Amino acid sequence: MFGNILGYLSKDLGIDLGTANTLIYSRGQGVVVNEPSVVAVNVRNGQILAVGHDAKAMLGKTPPHVQVTRPLQRGIIADFEVTEKMLRYFFEKLHRESSAFIPRPRVIVGVPLDVTEVERKAVGDAVLSAGARDVHLVEEPIAAAIGAGMPISDPVGNMIIDIGGGTSEIAVISLNGVVTAKSIAVAGDELNRNIMQYARDVFNLLLGEKVAEEIKINVGSAAEVTEKLETSMRGRDLLSGLPREITVNDAQIREALGRSVRTIVDHVKSILEVTPPELVADIYRRGIILTGGGALLRGIDRAISQGTGLPVRLTDDPLTSVVRGTGLLLEDRMLLHDVELPLAEVMR
């Protein structure tokens, strides 16, 4: 009975626990948290100094006793304790203005395709330790497809590509299940590293990850753009050791990103090669849906379309597709029962 009271006072939540960003959907309110999955910790006493945007602003600018960490790598928990504290911070922040004296929400979490049972248990335990009373895990491509409005319950082929921060997940879905799929470690973070490596090789310039990400957002593209784009690239000259600034354009950054874009296209083609022909016929007719923050890279839809010969389109607000899908599952218990992953190993 006490658990029911806590459930009534708490808000049911859907979480996209991503490598780059954590998004939380609150039932009845929509997306209420959209912050970087970054935590600043004082290593002297273990105190959490900042979470989300505030912590990301500290990247590369901290004294030795302050460590800025990303507790999730490739969508998988790399630091259990910090992940738990980050989630607890978000839970408490959401419940401050409500009547819930102890936040005990029911939570649905999106997890990567190739997550192991041990990693699955770590996610469930972290969410429960952070204050949830009940947790359900759903594969991210399933949640993203639901959030994109795809008819995953029908006997038709739905192909979705979710390009996140740590991984790109390519899946063909039919009848509430993943038929063929692949998860690759080529996504937003890898694109940032491509720019950093290009700056080092071509300009002898050492860039920080944050600067590389800004360059990707400002002028990055996967296919030719109609208008020429330019931005400044600031870093440390590897020869002189002094700060230096140069101007780069979209063609140079497109060259830097080219190999990773081709890798994504090649893996999409490899999934199509092992997909049953009836589902391929559906995909040819219906096209491929792109979601995830990485889908915002200019021309990525055209690059995949040119490589596969299939129509490709971005879903509305691709960054929030997964978390919106978990939000819809909060309202549909029957569909949740069909698509959730088994959690026998996680303590309830």
Image: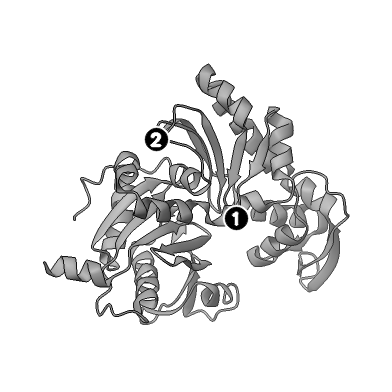
Q: How is the image coloured?
A: one colour
- Residue 200 vs 33, above or below: the answer is above
Q: Which image quarter is the N terminus in?
A: bottom left
Amino acid carrying label 1: it is: Asp
Residue 73 appearing in the image: no
Q: Position of residue 214 (x, y in %)?
A: 70, 64
Q: Which image quarter is the C terminus in?
A: bottom left
Whether residue 11 sits left or right of residue 324 in the image: it is left
Q: Earlier in the sequence, mark 2 or mark 1?
A: 2
Q: Position of residue 41 (x, y in %)?
A: 43, 76
Whether residue 89 sits left or right of residue 202 in the image: it is left
Q: For this rendering, which residue is in front, 139 or 29?
A: 29
Of helix, strand and loop, which one carries label 1? Answer: loop
Q: Position of residue 38 (x, y in %)?
A: 49, 68
Instruction: Report crowding for label 2: few under 14, some 14 to 19, many 20 or more residues within 10 A (C-alpha).
Output: some
For label 1, the residue is 317
Q: Which label number is shown at residue 82?
A: none
Q: For this rendering, which residue is in front, 263 or 63?
A: 263
> What is the count of numbered marks?
2
Whether residue 154 sits left or right of residue 243 in the image: it is left
Residue at 21% from the left image edge and 70% from the top image edge: 6
Residue at 78% from the left image edge and 48% from the top image edge: 254
Residue at 48% from the left image edge and 79% from the top image edge: 66
For label 2, the residue is 176
Of helix, strand and loop, which one carries label 2? Answer: loop
Find the distance from the CA under tag 2 to the CA under tag 1.
23 Å
Instruction: Report crowding for label 1: few under 14, some 14 to 19, many 20 or more residues within 10 A (C-alpha).
Output: some
Q: For this rendering, which residue is in front, 331 or 100?
A: 331
Whether residue 117 sits left or right of residue 255 in the image: it is left
Q: Position of residue 274 (x, y in %)?
A: 52, 21
